[in-house]
Image (tube, rainbow, N blue to C red):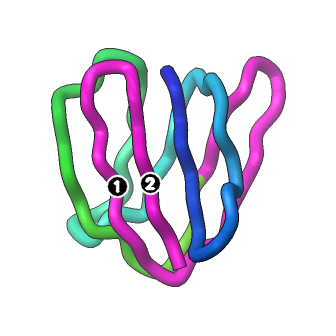
């Protein structure tokens, strides 16, 4: 799936991923390709991104995630 991860004034990640772990306001979520459409607020915590055999972790102070089809747009503080 394609991930567009942005903070104010910069792109943190823009590319293909296998899995996304989010600290959503309602609890932790794991997003896989083909996930149902979703818009959710993000709380303080982290975003974990699985890219082939590598994991990247981004610490965040909140934000917004939109998941649709095989695309995720995430805006964070």
Residue 54 location in percent, x, y?
Answer: 82, 31
Q: Which residue is mark 1?
A: 65
Badge 1 local density, few (<14 within 10 Å), some, or many (20+)? some
- The alpha-carbon separation of the residues under discs 1 and 2 comes to 4 Å
Judged from the image, the secondary structure of the residue bearing numbered disc 1 is strand
Would residue 24 be counted in the magenta stretch?
A: no
Frontmost residue, 19 versus 13: 13
Instruction: Determine whether, in the image, residue 70 is placed left or right of residue 52.
Output: left
Residue 43 location in percent, x, y?
Answer: 39, 77
Badge 2 local density, few (<14 within 10 Å), some, or many (20+)? many
Residue at the image point whose x is 76% and y is 39% from the top: 55
Judged from the image, the secondary structure of the residue bearing numbered disc 2 is strand
- Check the image and name the residue furthest to the right: 54
Q: Which residue is mark 2?
A: 74
Q: Which image quadrant for residue 64?
A: bottom left
Image vertical order of residue 53 relative to residue 48, above or below: above
Frontmost residue, 29 versus 58: 58
For the record, the magenta segment spans 48-77
Image vertical order of residue 58 relative to residue 69, above or below: below
Residue at the image point whose x is 23% and y is 59% from the top: 40
Q: Which mark is residue 20?
A: none
Q: Which image quadrant for residue 17?
A: top right
Residue at the image point whose x is 29% and y is 47% from the top: 66
- Check the image and name the residue furthest to the front: 9
Instruction: Determine whether, in the image, residue 58 is placed left or right of residue 24.
Output: right
First reached walking from the N terminus: tag 1 or tag 2: 1
Instruction: Determine whether, in the image, residue 65 is placed left or right of residue 7.
Output: left
Question: How many marks on residues?
Answer: 2
Tell me the chief SS of the magenta region.
strand
Residue 75 location in percent, x, y?
Answer: 45, 63
The answer to whether marks 1 and 2 mark residues whose Cβ atoms lie closer than 8 Å is yes
Image vertical order of residue 71 relative to residue 24, above or below: above
């Amino acid at each position: 799936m394609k991930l567009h991860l942005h903070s104010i004034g910069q792109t943190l990640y823009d590319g293909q991923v296998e899995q996304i772990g989010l600290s959503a306001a309602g609890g932790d979520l794991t997003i896989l390709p083909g996930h149902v459409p979703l818009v959710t607020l993000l709380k303080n915590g982290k975003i974990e991104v699985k890219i082939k055999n590598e994991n990247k972790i981004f610490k965040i102070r909140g934000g917004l995630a939109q998941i649709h089809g095989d695309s995720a747009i995430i805006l964070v503080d």
